[in-house]
Image (cartoon, rainbow, N blue to C red):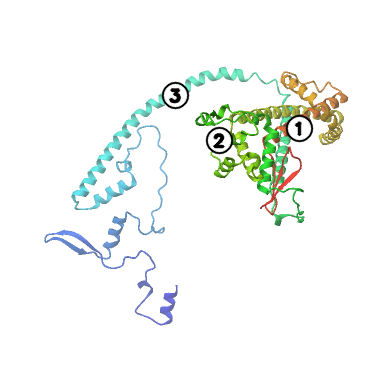
């Protein structure tokens, strides 16, 4: 350290290295202790030798770390005791560390105060209680051991009978390699599906402009030719047209009025009994909008003008409000539930057909020696050629699929090993047509439920595919 070097360099004789302490816990100052003397209670100054002992007693041996050189050598482990009486447990070992430390400190003191005496009595009571509990546990231990021995003996008696039964099934050893091959094939298929799923998920993720390898300028889109309406009114019109195409039949039903509006009268006639025509529809529509909490602007316009005389923006807003109210009606909700149920049925039938198609392709690949990818490519070409025929015979196929769907679970799988190659190809082509039919059905049902959003570009313009209007619509930010 720099201190001895400094002392030797400057020839300092009075101060030496022994006068420095490098311990951060060095006691500094004078220490006093309160003691009882013949003259009464007095404060007595402690000598330097007494100070470490008092600090150690107060802090509970949490002072300086032990010196490894002066530590006592560890005693060799005692030999394992045999049977007989267990070693006598010391009373102090029954206490926790804090209680044992406190008891030791109190016993070391010569004079105890009333509070210390109370603490000591409590600790001794706790020791006696724990000793009694331990004696009870030791008395119960032999009984528990005997019960365990009896239960083990009963189990051993029943084991030989089970062993005889286990020795019999050693006949089916030839099926092991086949099961292993099937397990390997199933694992490969599972890995292939997971890989394709990951590829699809990565393709669906949006890509930032800075990450694009082929950064190309977006085309400049022109507005729809002949469009005079503002964008808000035009989007409302598109919403109304899509709703009418999907649920037009259900929309013809009367959405109804709340109960408190049923008795409302106009010119002495109840609203619920008025026949709707070109002249009366405006007033009935105003009552409907007021009852369902429409804005004041929509209702005030119908108070002074008929619906036909309103500006196009107001007309589109009223029609969209009607569409939103019908979407939450019980009739439309039941139609949506029916569509979802039919979608689940179509999806289930498609999965069954895809499973059969996969098995037939595997059988054909084994017979012809070609890979499944080549067979799938051939089937795609045939599917394109036969797509026109399937579109023309769509109605006939729909009726056939309804009857086949009921029988599909009852029918047994054909024995592919006995079928010839032309027969397998014919079955694959037939199932491919049915698969295409169910795909179209699923697409039509999903388009009935909602329009498809293709995402946004860098200018935050949304791209929509409206199934009943045709084409892709770009929603600009205005």
Residue 2 disc label: none
Q: Secondary structure at mark 3?
A: helix
Residue at image coords 43%, 81% = 9
Q: Toward which corner of the image does residue 210 lie, by quadrant?
A: bottom right
In the rendered image, the residue lying farthest to the left is 39
- Is residue 301 or residue 337 the one in the foreground? 301
41 over 15 or under it: above or below: above
Residue 149 disc label: 3
In the rendered image, the residue lying farthest to the front is 267
Of callouts 3 and 2, the N-terminal one: 3
Location of residue 181 in the rendering, given as x and y in whole percent from the top left corner: 74, 31
Q: Label 2 belongs to which residue?
A: 287
344 over 475 or under it: above or below: above
Q: CA distance from mark 3 to mark 2?
A: 88 Å
Q: Could you tell me which quadrant the N terminus lies in?
A: bottom left
Nearer the observer: mark 1 or 3; the answer is 1
Location of residue 147 in the rendering, given as x and y in whole percent from the top left corner: 41, 23
191 over 35 or under it: above or below: above
Q: Toward which corner of the image does residue 294 lie, by quadrant?
A: top right
Q: How many marks?
A: 3
Residue 440 disc label: 1
């Amino acid at each position: 350290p720099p201190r001895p070097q400094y002392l030797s360099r400057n020839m300092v004789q009075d101060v030496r290295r022994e006068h420095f302490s490098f311990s951060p816990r060095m006691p500094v100052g004078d220490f006093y202790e309160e003691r009882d003397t013949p003259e009464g209670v007095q404060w007595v100054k402690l000598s330097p030798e007494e100070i470490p002992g008092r600090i150690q007693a107060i802090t509970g041996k949490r002072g300086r770390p032990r010196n490894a050189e002066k530590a006592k050598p560890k005693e060799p482990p005692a030999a394992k005791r045999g049977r007989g009486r267990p070693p006598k447990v010391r009373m102090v070992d029954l206490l926790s560390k804090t209680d044992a430390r406190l008891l030791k400190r109190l016993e070391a003191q010569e004079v105890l105060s009333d509070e210390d005496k109370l603490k000591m009595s409590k600790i001794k009571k706790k020791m006696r209680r724990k000793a009694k509990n331990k004696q009870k546990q030791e008395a119960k231990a032999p009984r528990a051991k005997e019960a365990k021995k009896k239960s083990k003996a009963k189990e051993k008696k029943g084991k030989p009978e089970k062993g005889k039964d286990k020795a019999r099934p050693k006949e089916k050893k030839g099926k092991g390699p086949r099961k292993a091959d099937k397990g390997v094939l199933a694992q490969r298929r599972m890995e292939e599906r997971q890989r394709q799923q990951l590829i699809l998920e990565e393709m669906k993720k949006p890509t930032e402009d800075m990450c694009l390898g082929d950064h190309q300028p977006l085309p400049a889109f022109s507005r729809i030719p002949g469009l005079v309406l503002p964008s808000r009114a035009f989007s409302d019109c598109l919403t109304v047209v899509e709703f009418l195409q999907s649920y037009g039949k259900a929309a013809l039903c009367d959405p109804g009025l709340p109960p408190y509006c049923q008795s409302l009268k106009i010119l002495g006639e109840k609203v619920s009994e008025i026949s709707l025509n070109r002249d009366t529809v405006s007033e009935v529509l105003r009552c409907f909008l007021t009852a369902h909490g429409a804005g004041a602007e929509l209702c005030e316009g119908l108070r002074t003008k008929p619906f036909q005389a309103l500006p196009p923006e107001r007309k589109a807003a009223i029609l969209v409000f009607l569409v939103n109210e019908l979407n939450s009606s019980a009739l439309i909700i039941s139609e949506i539930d029916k569509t979802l149920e039919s979608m689940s049925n179509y999806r289930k039938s498609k999965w069954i057909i895809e499973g059969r198609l996969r098995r037939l392709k595997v059988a054909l690949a084994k017979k012809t020696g070609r890979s499944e990818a080549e067979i799938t490519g051939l089937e795609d070409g045939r599917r394109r050629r036969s797509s026109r025929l399937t579109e023309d015979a769509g109605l006939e196929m729909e009726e056939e699929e309804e009857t086949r769907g009921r029988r599909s679970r009852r029918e047994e799988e054909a024995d592919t090993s006995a079928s010839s190659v032309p027969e397998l190809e014919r079955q694959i082509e037939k199932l491919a047509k049915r698969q295409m039919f169910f795909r179209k059905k699923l697409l039509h049902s999903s388009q009935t439920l909602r329009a498809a959003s293709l995402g946004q570009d860098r200018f935050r313009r949304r791209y929509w595919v409206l199934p009943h209007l045709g084409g892709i619509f770009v929603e600009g930010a205005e």
